Image (cartoon, rainbow, N blue to C red):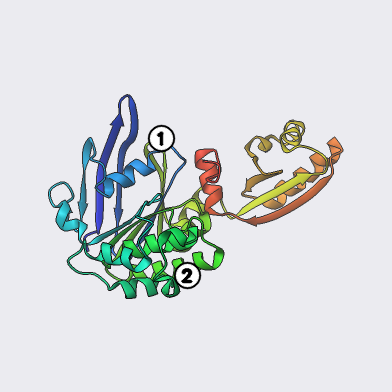
Amino acid sequence: MEPLLTAQHLRKKFGKLTAVDDITISVQAGECLALLGPNGAGKTTTVEMLEGLQSPDSGEIKIFGQSLKTHRQQIMQSIGVMLQETQLYKKLTVKETLQLFASFFQKSLSPVEAIAMVELGDKSKARLEHLSGGQKQRVYLACSLINEPRLLFLDEPTTGLDPQSRRMIWDLLIKHKGKDRGILLTTHYMDEAEKLADRVAIVDHGRIIANGTPSQLIREHCGEQVVCFRYQGLDAQEAKKRLLPHVPWMKDAVQIGASLELIAQDPVQIITELSRASDLQGLVLEQLEMRRSTLEDVFIKLTGRSIRDA
């Protein structure tokens, strides 16, 4: 079955800066692809080219088997876009906003259906200027879904939402994928990527540096376990410096908050060696625990930073 989206060898430069350098990706029907990357990695530029907001310097984009360059108007009828920073006229009510967006398409849901879908029925007559940040975010999502798009682009869709609203959005998006629909998602929430994404592509310095299912990426780059530890009355970096002569693998430990974390292929051996080295240095472990590896660990290992700091 032909992918809903194929992008091959995309490149984009701004002056001397190469923002996107030979990126090739695809989105299949029934699939959610999460595009993850630090700020400045080329992720936003890539998505804007896929959405038709920017033109690539070279490369080809096909959506529903048609060239985005030559069939843009036709393609736009069947895609939905939710931008990270959406500015809508704040004096319109929620219902009026959805009526406006419905008018852009040949076929669409009714505003009442779209409002019910994001559970804002009690806010139908409220002006956007009177909504909370999370409620506005749900209106923006309803706007992107009004035409029941076959391909949905979501840029940070749950920013500002409380946990209950986030899970409501997740359930809605899982249902939306269906058999013939796809989603391209960008997010700073690793739990969101793990929950929604069938595949993940990590972008850095304008290139895709890893691509696969969340479980594949975790298994390939991190193994199964991470050892987390913290010392009583001692800064994490100072502890790392003092322990490094005794345990050379300490150079790979990453500071997360006040703790150090280490991807461990053999966690029992790591804990044994860490305890012995701590005793030799007279250091008191305040925290020592193991947890399962996550996409966040993959991201840190490949880019050298947490996505929350990126």
Q: What amino acid type should be assigned to the residue bearing mark 2?
A: Met
Name the spot of residue 87 as percent of width and height, x first. 37, 51
- Residue 196 in which image quadrant: bottom left
- Report if the CB atoms under discs 2 and 1 are less than 8 Å apart: no
Q: Residue at x 55, y 40 (%)?
A: 305
Q: Name which residue lies at 12% across and 48% down.
A: 70
Residue 19 occupies which quadrant of the picture? Answer: top left
Task: Pinpoint residue 62: horizontal percent, then vertical percent.
Answer: 20, 51
In this view, which residue lies farthest toward the front? Answer: 91
Q: Is residue 248 left or right of residue 161?
A: right
Answer above or below: position of 210 versus 136: above
Question: Residue 112, percent across and down?
Answer: 33, 75
* Closer to us: 174 or 143: 143
| Vertical placement of residue 153 versus 202, above or below | below
The one nearer the camera, 139 or 302, is 139
Disc on res. 32: none
Q: Does any portion of residue 150 appear in the rendered image?
A: no
Question: 300 left or right of 181?
Answer: right
Nearest the eye: 211 or 138: 138
> 300 or 44, which lies in front?
44
Judge from the rendering whether residue 161 lies leftward or rightward of residue 146; answer left or right.
right
In this rendering, does residue 232 appear at all? Answer: yes
Residue holding disc 1: 205
Q: Nearer the viewer, mark 2 or mark 1?
A: 2
* Crowd tier of the residue under label 2, counting other residues whose Cα lies within 10 Å: few below 14, some 14–19, many 20 or above: some
- Residue 257 percent location from the top left of the image: 67, 44
Q: Mark 2 points at which residue?
A: 168
For label 1, the crowd category at 10 Å Cα-Cα, with few meaning under 14, some 14 to 19 and many 20 or more, is: some
Residue that lies at the very extreme toward the left in this rendered image: 70
Mark 2 → mark 1, Cα distance in angstroms? 34 Å
| Amino acid of disc 1 | His
